[in-house]
Image (cartoon, grey):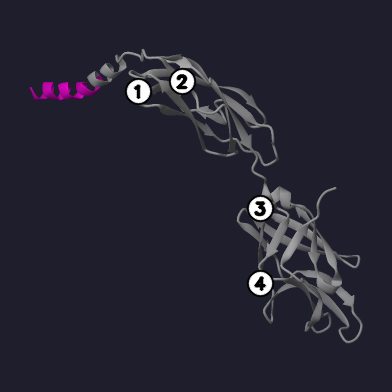
Amino acid sequence: MKYLKLLALCLLPISFAACSDDEEINSGNATVGFTSTELSVTENTPMVEIPISLEGDHTGPVKLNIEVTDCNGTSVTNDETVILTSNSLVMPSGVETVQAELRSSVYTVEDNLDRSFTVKITSAEGATIGNATCKVNIEEIPDPYANLAGNWTLSAGRAGNLAVVLNTREDRSGYDCTMTLQGVEMPFTIAYSPQGLTVKMKTTLAEGLDFGDPVGVADAVLAYIDGNYLVTDPLSASWNEDLNLILFDYPMTAALFSSATGQFTGYTWFMTDTVMRKVESK
């Protein structure tokens, strides 16, 4: 007897589900469709929700079939980088809006400015179809690493504006850089992460420079100034939203150390502010 009662209880949810499936399709005068015919999302958005709304008489369920069509652009592939969570949707009585849900993994390092896909209502039971399609445009997220590479200028007081070049690395770990002062190219490095930049200090920019008396022959070493202190710890920096400014926490300088004794003897240049500016491409 206990076995029979348990079996009956287990069958109850199945019976209820069957009843809901048998509910009569909406017979009222209703129109269903996407609330917008076009929208935009940024690349690498993990979940895209597209609202579908119903207007008119709604006394029973409305059933929809949807699909993804017209995939355009690099990395936009149906059932791979763009995946519908369900091709069938049901709008029960009293529910006027549902979401077409898609998982998205569209992303490219290089810029892709023409990428899109379309979601289409292919059929509807219980309502006529209004806006049958919604085009989804995938907007590019600028890649900071790639966009920060190139030519920059650094204001160095009486030394003028120094030309600085940031060259990328294959592993995207940072930049191999050069700054040029009076025809002398001085190499240094900047480490990169998505959170910011770190300039390696205590880098020898140039050796054996003859400045005459009283400085004599000295080596130029990259450092920064914190108040009255010369610091050779790594220097943090960040970039602005437009990727055309690099903002240093402190002003950099080229400190001079005697080639003979290693003693500090002065500066050859120092930044008048804490900003490096991108040179616009012509």
Q: Nearer the viewer, residue 203 or 266?
A: 266
Is label 4 in a helix, a strand or a loop?
Answer: loop
The three-letter amino acid code for the residue at tag 2 is: Val
Q: Which comes sooner in the sequence, label 2 or label 3?
A: 2
Which residue does the numbered mark 3 point to in the structure image? 241
Q: Nearer the viewer, residue 277 or 96?
A: 96
The three-letter amino acid code for the residue at tag 1 is: Pro
Q: Position of residue 54 (x, y in %)?
A: 43, 23
Is label 3 in a helix, a strand or a loop?
Answer: loop
Q: Determine the CA span between mark 4 and mark 3.
A: 26 Å
Q: Determine the CA span between mark 4 and mark 2.
A: 63 Å
Specify start and end residues of the magenta stretch as a single range: 1-14
- Mark toward the viewer: 4 or 3: 3
- Mark toward the viewer: 2 or 1: 2
Which residue does the numbered mark 4 point to in the structure image? 233
Residue 171 visible, this orientation: no
Dominant SS in magenta: helix
Residue 2 lies in magenta, yes or no? Answer: yes
Q: Determine the CA span between mark 2 and mark 3.
A: 41 Å
Q: Left or right of 92: which side holds 134? A: right
Which residue does the numbered mark 1 point to in the structure image? 92
The three-letter amino acid code for the residue at tag 3 is: Glu
Which residue does the numbered mark 2 point to in the structure image? 32
- Mark toward the viewer: 4 or 2: 2
Q: Position of residue 60 (x, y in %)?
A: 33, 18
Q: Determine the CA span between mark 2 and mark 1.
A: 13 Å
Q: Which comes sooner in the sequence, label 4 or label 1?
A: 1
Q: Which comes sooner in the sequence, label 4 or label 3?
A: 4
Tell me the quarter of the image containing the N terminus. top left
